[in-house]
Image: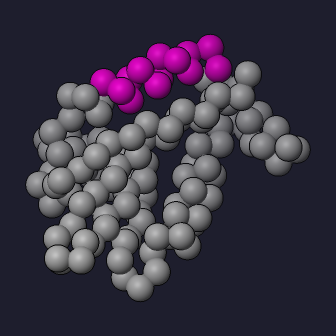
Amino acid sequence: GPKLEKAYKQKGGWEGWAQVELASYLEQVFGGEGVATVSREDYVYNGNDQRSDLLIKTQKENGTYFTNMFELKCESSANSGNFRTKVQADCTKITNGVWNTEFAPCEAWIIAIGVT
């Protein structure tokens, strides 16, 4: 729609906006009754300053936790030429990443939104 079209053309793209919208939605759906927490830009990788875009940490009935980590890529006018390369870089980051133990066990996902 028109809102996304304007965001697509913004300098810096619309990935941050998408993160906020998605985090808000996921918090609404999964965050009830303290079962799950949704956060953004967490330092999930050991030994560097790379962060995840979204993190859902869920408490199971037995009191243990599991984590779903998401890397988000949103195509914009500024990155459309190298969008695929950026997505592949996130794939490499997830594949080669060593997780902080506080987030284990952790499943990693990539959400790539292309609009062209």
In this picture, is 71 found above or below 82?
A: below
Q: Residue sitting at 21 percent across and 44 percent down?
A: 45
**Horizontal and vertical percent position of residue 74:** 59, 35
Quadrant, the N terminus: top right
Whether 85 is among the magenta residues is yes
Outermost right residue: 2
Whether 97 is among the magenta residues is no
In the image, 56: left or right of 81?
A: left
Q: Which residues are magenta?
A: 80-92
Report which quarter residue 35 is drawn in. Answer: bottom left
Report which quarter residue 10 is drawn in. Answer: top right
In this picture, is 21 found above or below 14?
A: below
**Horizontal and vertical percent position of residue 85:** 47, 16
**Horizontal and vertical percent position of residue 83:** 56, 21
Outermost bottom residue: 33
In this picture, is 110 found above or below 95?
A: below
In this picture, is 45 found above or below 82?
A: below
Quadrant, the C terminus: top right
User: Magenta stretch: dominant SS?
Assistant: helix
Q: Which is more toward the observer, 49 or 73?
A: 73
How does the figure colour the protein chain or chains? Answer: one colour
In the image, 14: left or right of 26?
A: right
**Horizontal and vertical percent position of residue 78:** 66, 25
Q: Which is more toward the observer, 25 or 51?
A: 25
Q: Which is more toward the observer, 24 or 68?
A: 68
In the image, 27: left or right of 67?
A: right
In the image, 30: left or right of 57?
A: right
Q: Residue sitting at 52 percent across and 18 percent down?
A: 84
Query: Does the rendering let one see residue 6?
Result: no
Query: Does the rendering let one see residue 58?
Result: yes
Q: Residue sitting at 63 percent across and 52 percent down?
A: 17
